[in-house]
Image: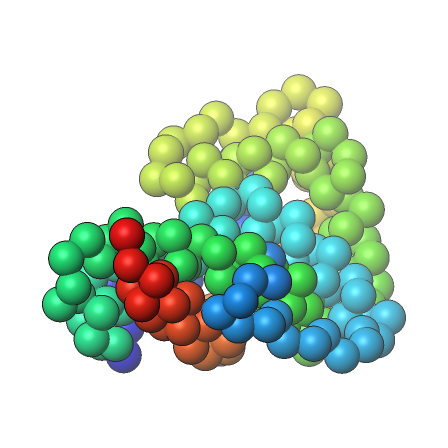
């Protein structure tokens, strides 16, 4: 089970990606075949579009690879007894995350579609394609990396303020401030999706030898 500090780190990263009030004020290899992605509904497709933009902005791929190749994961699955396990596990984690990337976006999109309305998702997706939205994503990227980036300014800030003054922007912002349960559910689903494939890839590499 993830430690409290790791859960908080994940929540902060998702909160940054979710464009919370703080922002407004300032992935087939032989080891495992990627799961088949069932068809998306229209709201889920909108959610997946949002998930893709947010995951790219906060380097969610890098976050997952670190989680799946760290000592806690290795110990939990008995992978840390072999010499050179660190390099092998990191390669396995990166390959599995990349192979399952479309499914991860789908899972995140479905959760976003359950939390936000289609109108809210349409509005935020359109906003994120504008200069103000791009500036806000860059700000989120800096926050997720533990930096203190400057808040959007000039025209970008005007667009940010205008979006969050709309009915859809206001409701999106309010919901995005309360993402703890969504963060836990999203991490749980993604780790469940990835863990077995990472272990299988690691074991295949170990059996293949140097």
* Residue 208, above or below 2: above
The image quadrant that residue 7 belongs to is bottom left
How far across and how far down the image is residue 202, in percent?
A: 35, 65
Q: What residue is rendered at 60% in x and 50% in y?
A: 54
Residue 206 is left or right of residue 61, and the answer is left
Q: Nearer the viewer, residue 152 or 35?
A: 35
Locate the N terminus by quadrant: bottom left
Q: How many marks?
A: 0
Q: Residue 109 or 177: which is nearer the viewer?
A: 109
Using residue 137 as the reference point, say whether residue 143 is left or right of it: left
Residue at figure coordinates x 59%, y 72% from the top left: 33
Q: Nearer the viewer, residue 47 or 102?
A: 102
Q: Give residue 162's quadrant in the image.
A: top right
Q: Which colour style is shown?
A: rainbow
- Image height of 167 relative to 117, above or below: above
Q: Position of residue 174 (x, y in %)?
A: 60, 62
Residue 71 spot, x, y in % from top left: 20, 61
Q: Nearer the viewer, residue 193 or 132?
A: 193
Residue 153 placed where, x, y %? 61, 24
67 vs 178, left or right, is left
The image quadrant that residue 121 belongs to is bottom right
In this orientation, does residue 176 appear? no
Q: Residue shown at 83%/63% (left/top)? A: 119
Q: Residue 61: tell me if it is visible.
A: yes
Specify the farthest residue to the top: 154
Going 57% across and 51% down the picture, which residue do you hit? 55
């Amino acid at each position: 089970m993830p430690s409290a500090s790791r859960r908080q780190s994940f929540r902060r990263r998702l909160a940054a990606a979710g464009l919370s009030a703080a922002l407004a004020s300032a992935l087939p290899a032989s080891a495992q075949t990627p799961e088949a992605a069932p068809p998306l509904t229209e709201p889920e497709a909108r959610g997946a579009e949002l998930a893709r933009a947010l995951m790219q902005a906060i380097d969610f791929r890098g976050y997952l690879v670190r989680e799946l190749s760290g000592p806690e994961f290795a110990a939990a699955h008995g992978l840390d007894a072999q010499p050179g396990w660190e390099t092998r596990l990191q390669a396995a984690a990166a390959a599995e995350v990349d192979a399952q990337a479309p499914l991860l976006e789908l899972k995140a999109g479905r959760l976003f579609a359950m939390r936000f309305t289609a109108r809210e998702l349409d509005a935020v997706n359109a906003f994120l394609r504008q200069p103000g939205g791009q500036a806000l994503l860059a700000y989120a990227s800096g926050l997720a990396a533990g930096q203190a980036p400057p808040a959007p300014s000039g025209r970008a800030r005007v667009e940010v303020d205008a979006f969050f003054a709309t009915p859809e922007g206001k409701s999106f912002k309010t919901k995005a401030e309360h993402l703890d349960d969504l963060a836990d559910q999203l991490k749980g689903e993604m780790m469940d999706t990835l863990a077995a494939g990472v272990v299988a890839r690691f074991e295949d590499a170990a059996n293949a030898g140097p």
